[in-house]
Each structure stands twice: as C-alpha cells, then as structure tokens.
Image: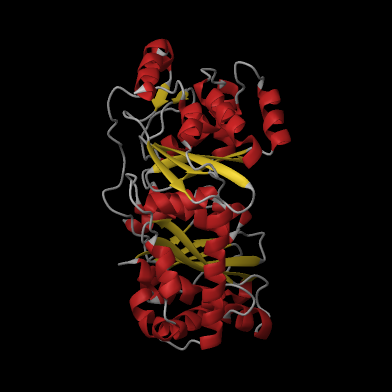
C-alpha cells in the first residue's frame, strides 16, 4: 500500500516532466522474482520495461535514452562524480534487450548493494536528461555496416536485430526524443538477503506509474524467417572473404533446442570440433572456423557456421562446411566429442547463471514473461542435464534444418558465386553503400 501511495504521489509531481518526455513505465506495481544468489561475491538487480515500439529506430532510441538516464548525475552527484562513485565501489550497469523488453542490470559487491540500489533509484528518479549525451549515445548505437569489419559475431547481431525488429523505421524522427524511466514491470533480484523487500523498496521509491497500459506498435505477429539464398558483398580491395551460413530456427521444445546446440557445437565450437580439425588443421584454409548458437527468444535461435578464408578458397571451404554439417546432421558423430561438448555446455550454463545476472534474467523472462509466484524452473537447463548422447545424433535431422535452408553470406573479395549457385534459392549483391537489411529485404520479396 505504501508503494502505491508513493508512486501515485510522484505521478502528480512529475506531470510537467511527463508532458515533455516519453515515460517508459508499467501501469501497475512490478512483479518480483528472487533468484538464487550469485557465486562471485556480487549481488544484482534487473529492471524490466516493456518495449513500446518495435521499429528498429525506436528500439535504438530507447537504448540511447536509458543509457543517457543512467549516465546522468543525481541531485547530490554530478555525472562525473556518479561515475567515479560506481567505479570506486565496483558497481556496474548494463543494458540489454530481449524479444519484448529492455533490461537494466546493476551488479555490486554484497557489502555495498543496499547503497547501490539507492544510487540506482537516484539516477532513474532524476528528471535531468542530457540531449547532448543522448545524441552521443544514439551515434554510438547506430548500426555499423556489417560489411566493414566482417566479424562473424557482428554480422550475427545485425541479423538478430533484423529477425527481432523487422521494421527498420516507423518514420518518427528520434533526434530530439527525451525519455523518463519509471516503474519497471518486473524486477529480478539476486542477493544473499532472505527478505529483499526493503532493498527493492529503496530502488523504486518515487518512480512513476503510467495511467494506463501502452499497446506496443510495430511488433511482428510471428517470428520473421530469414530468406534462403546467397548474399555477396564484394570488396575490390579485399583479399579475404568471410563465409557465414545462418539459419533462424524455431524449436518445438527445449530438448530439440539442446540437441541442435550440442550438434552445432560439435561441428565448430572449441579446438576439437570438426571444422577446426578439417578446415584449419588439415586444409589450413582458415584461422577461425567456428559455429555459433545464438539464442534470441524462447525456443528460438540463430544457427551459424563461419570461416574467414583467402578469397579464391571460399568455394572449397563452403563445400567443406556443407559436408561437415550434413554428415553431422545425418548422425555421423563421435561419442567422445559429443560428450565433451555436453560437459562444456553444461559448465557454461552453470557459470553464466552463477555469474551473469543479465543472461540469467533473460532466461527467466523467456519462460516467465509475465512473472511467477511459484517455483522457477528453466526447461532448457533440465533438457541439457537429461540429454542422452545416444539419441542426440539419431535425432539430427529432427533438430537441424538441411543446409539448403541456410542463408549464405560472402563478405569481401571479388569472387562472386557461380551462376548455378545464384539461381538455386535467390541471390543479392550488396552495394558497399547499403546495410545488410537491403539484401535481407530484397530476398524476402
């Protein structure tokens, strides 16, 4: 009741602020989830706000707005003093997005966590919003053309944004947008305190509620499929070509997702993988052959295989990647290698859950988008523990799509795909001046 009284009072006090700033806030008190304490001597809290507009330009503006809010000072500290306070006390702030929400995660040592929550509250409740800092953050977040640095992880992130936020722009000029961040819709806390209620109250004191729910706009009705085909981004000055084969997979359940993850790891993760053994050691054709399993939502992931090679070698290396993939998918898998990958993936999940509150919060939100008051269970973790190695290989064709369903990107060099490859599923040559979305949208037509 005290929380309701405080938030309603502050709404009245901040009416002038809300008239000029876009208020991002829930219309009711937040739902609270307390996960097990972390094991690295830190406590953490994650504030979760619903994304109001899913057009890519608006999501970038929202990220810039939240970054601006937490980079400002408080009534007692200048921006420099606030940053120094966090650095001296080991307090860190991080922003991330998942398929429906924007997350702000704060970590701090147990001893200063209570004070850190008060500091977080002071940052969010502070009405100051620096337009200059917002412009700077907007510039930093502007997507870099994926053809420039040719890093596989960057290209995958660009594709992830396209899949999650297919509308590039809603036509709104976000240059002068101002944001105020009020009451989050969910709070996920990791602390050694048995009763975190006083801590949570100190973090949300004075944060405003909205008068009513906001209906999200530009949210896709269904997951966006990546097109099949080939995208070629030539570079007349480049002598290397990045090969990246990627597929947006939607799984029936957590078991199928884990099977796909383990099989993809077997192909290209770690030094014992098939791609490392064949493409790097035997062929000596690439220094970084790898696979990547990039989860983007509940039972959804981007599956990717990549290698950077000398331009004349890309056709042979792509064919080798295809062979490794289809052979693994058909069940030709070494038991010891698969067991090693299961052990690594399980250790990785355990480590991230114990030390990475942002990743843990996203896993929680995938399963409980509206919160829960019951026992928290993450099916993905259970599926990994219960995975039976003797059946994973046998279900390869159920877990993984055929390689012909992948989108293949060739970035750099001057050797285009031969005509037969261009005609198989679709082909787009990406001009140097255009972002990757240019060809993604063209292949969808």
- Which image quarter: residue 169? top left
Direction front: furthest residue: 194
* Of residues 216 and 190, the one drawn nearer to the viewer in this rendering: 190
Query: Can the viewer see residue 334 in this picture?
Result: no
> Percent position (x, y) of residue 301?
42, 61
**Residue found at x 37% / y 40%:** 54
> Percent position (x, y) of residue 407?
43, 66
**Residue found at x 36% / y 66%:** 254
Q: Vertically, is 230 above or below 219?
A: below
**Residue found at x 48% / y 22%:** 176
* Of residues 368 and 161, the one drawn nearer to the viewer in this rendering: 368
Report whether 32 appears left or right of 353: left
Query: Can the viewer see residue 307 in this picture?
Result: yes
Q: Vertically, is 305 above or below 336?
A: above
Q: Vertically, is 162 above or below 248?
A: above
**Residue found at x 39% / y 84%:** 391
Question: Which quadrant would the C terminus be assigned to in this image?
Answer: bottom left
Question: Which quadrant would the N terminus be assigned to in this image?
Answer: top left
> Percent position (x, y) of residue 3?
38, 24
């Amino acid at each position: 009741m005290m929380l309701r009284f405080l938030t309603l009072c502050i709404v009245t006090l901040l009416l002038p602020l809300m008239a000029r700033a876009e208020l991002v806030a829930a219309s009711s008190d937040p739902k609270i989830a307390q996960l097990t304490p972390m094991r690295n001597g830190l406590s953490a809290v994650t504030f979760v706000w619903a994304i109001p507009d899913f057009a890519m330009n608006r999501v970038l503006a929202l990220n810039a707005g939240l970054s601006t809010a937490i980079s400002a000072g408080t009534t007692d500290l200048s921006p420099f003093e606030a940053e120094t306070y966090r650095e001296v006390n080991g307090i860190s702030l991080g922003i991330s997005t998942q398929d429906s929400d924007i997350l702000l995660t704060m970590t701090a040592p147990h001893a200063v966590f209570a004070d850190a929550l008060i500091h977080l509250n002071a940052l969010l409740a502070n009405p100051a919003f620096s337009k200059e800092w917002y412009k700077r953050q907007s510039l930093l977040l502007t997507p870099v053309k994926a053809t420039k640095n040719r890093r596989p992880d960057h290209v995958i992130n660009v594709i992830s944004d396209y899949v999650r936020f297919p509308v590039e722009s809603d036509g709104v000029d976000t240059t002068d947008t101002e944001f105020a961040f009020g009451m989050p819709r969910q709070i996920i806390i990791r602390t050694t305190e048995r009763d975190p209620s006083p801590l949570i109250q100190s973090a949300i004191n004075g944060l405003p509620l909205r008068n009513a729910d906001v209906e999200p706009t530009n949210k896709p009705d269904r997951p966006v499929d990546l097109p099949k085909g080939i995208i070629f981004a030539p570079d007349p000055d480049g002598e290397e070509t990045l090969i990246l084969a990627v597929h947006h997979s939607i799984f029936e359940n957590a078991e199928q997702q884990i099977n796909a993850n383990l099989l993809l790891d077997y192909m290209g993760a770690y030094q014992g993988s098939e791609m490392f053994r064949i493409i790097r050691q035997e062929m000596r054709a690439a220094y970084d052959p790898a696979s990547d399993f990039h989860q983007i939502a509940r039972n959804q992931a981007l599956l990717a295989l990549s290698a950077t090679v000398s331009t004349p070698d890309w056709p042979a290396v792509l064919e080798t990647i295809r062979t490794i993939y289809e052979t693994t998918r058909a069940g030709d898998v070494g038991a010891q290698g698969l067991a090693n990958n299961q052990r690594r993936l399980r250790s990785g999940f355990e480590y991230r859950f114990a030390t990475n509150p942002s990743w843990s919060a996203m896993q929680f939100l995938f399963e409980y988008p509206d919160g829960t008051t019951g026992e928290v269970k993450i099916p993905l973790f259970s599926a990994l523990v219960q995975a039976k190695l003797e059946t994973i290989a046998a279900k390869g064709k159920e877990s993984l799509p055929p390689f012909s369903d992948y989108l293949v990107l060739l970035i750099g060099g001057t050797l285009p795909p031969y005509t037969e490859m261009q005609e198989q599923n679709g082909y787009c040559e990406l001009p140097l001046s255009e972002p990757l979305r240019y060809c993604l949208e063209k292949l969808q037509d």
